[in-house]
Image (tube, rainbow, N blue to C red):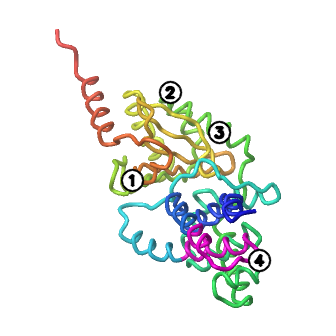
Amino acid sequence: MTRTEEFEELRSLLFAIAYRILGSVSEAEDAVQETWLRYETSPAQPASAKAFLSSVVTRISIDVLRSARMRREAYVGPWFPEPLLTDPYQDPERSTELSDSLSMAALLLLERLSPVERAVFVLREVFAFGFPDIASTVGRSEAACRQLAVRARRHMDAGRPRFEADRKEREELATRFFDAFRDGDVDTLRELLADDVQMAGDGGGKAPLWGKEGAFGIDNVARRVAVFAPLFTGVGGVVELREVNGQPGAILRARDGNILGTWALDILDGRIQAIRTVINPDKLRHMGPVADAWAILREASLTRRSSRQPDSA
């Protein structure tokens, strides 16, 4: 095969590695492109294209993550990964590891690891790379990489839920939730929420959030959703059920079909434990045209006020 053919065959794997290290679709795509440029201009022919390209994209991602961490310290409000609707890389033998590492909850846990720890965990636990290759990639000894992997695995295991509903149960619960959302059915919403449910959104200071600090507890979250739902549907908003980072969720679209945001649901023990929304337009552009959330909020507010005014005699 030519280098171009080798690279294209491995592109989905390279993106999957970079996205799990970076939590950003745009940065992962840039890392993959930079990997190609280095491969294209490399004077030597590596013995294994997979080993070479995986190593390069990992090192690039580590460097990008280090600089991104500094920017995220000044980020306005909660920082969430860029939503990913479809993972381009599929491996039936590692479907569980791929799915588990893609969720918003898992990516947020990975954020607490150092860049090298995160890379070691992703390469070893998700993609089953051998420690010799990992050690060469991150510039550490095999023994050090084994210790990093153990520490990272312990951290991830401690933060993961003990039991999740199966896929069908999660999809059914999500369908009921968004049906109740569309209908403004507060009672059903409350039935589906855990007592200690959390709701938080990532607007990055570039889009309106209904409550900058999020909402905690069944009463507060149910109230927040009950207030937002009629505002959204009242201006022609549409809920499109989709998996978001491998979790049940939805894309919220404006009347014209442009994207307003994504919702991802964490479901545990038959109840929704967390609702994570992303409305920062910079994190949605890779999915298609993005709506003007501020304009929609103004329209919704005007519509609500006019509906409250009594008819003149």
Q: Amino acid at mark 1?
A: Gly
Q: Main secondary structure of the magenta part?
A: helix
Give the residue at mark 4. 47
Q: Which one is nearer the viewer's eye here, 162 or 139?
A: 139
Which quadrant does the C terminus fall into? top left
Q: CA distance from mark 4 to mark 1?
A: 45 Å
Instruction: Report the number of numbered marks.
Output: 4
Query: Residue 146, position in %: x, y?
Result: 73, 84
Q: Residue furthest left?
A: 313
Cα separation between marks 1 and 3: 26 Å
Q: Is residue 214 magenta?
A: no
In the image, is 53 to the left or to the right of 80? right
**Dot 4 and dot 3 residues touching (CB under 8 Å):** no
Name the image quarter holding residue 309. top left
Tag 4 or tag 2, which sits nearer the N-term? 4
Q: Look at the numbered discs 2 and 4 and tell me whether their residues touch, using CB distance below 8 Å.
A: no
Q: Amino acid at mark 2?
A: Asp
Q: Nearer the viewer, mark 2 or mark 1?
A: 1
Asked if residue 127 lies left or right of residue 74, the reply is: right
Discs 1, 3 touching: Cβ within 8 Å: no
Where residue 268 sits: x, y (%)?
Answer: 66, 51
Q: Which residue in the structure is indicated by mark 2? A: 183
Instruction: Categorize mark 2 by other alpha carbons within 10 Å: few (<14), some (14-19), many (20+).
Output: some
Question: Distance of mark 2 from mark 1, alpha carbons?
Answer: 25 Å
Return the residue found at the far top.
313
Residue at the spot 72% in from the left edge and 66% down from the top edge = 126
- Depth check, mark 1 against mark 3: the one in front is 1
- At mark 4, the secondary structure is loop
Which residue has dot 1 on it? 203
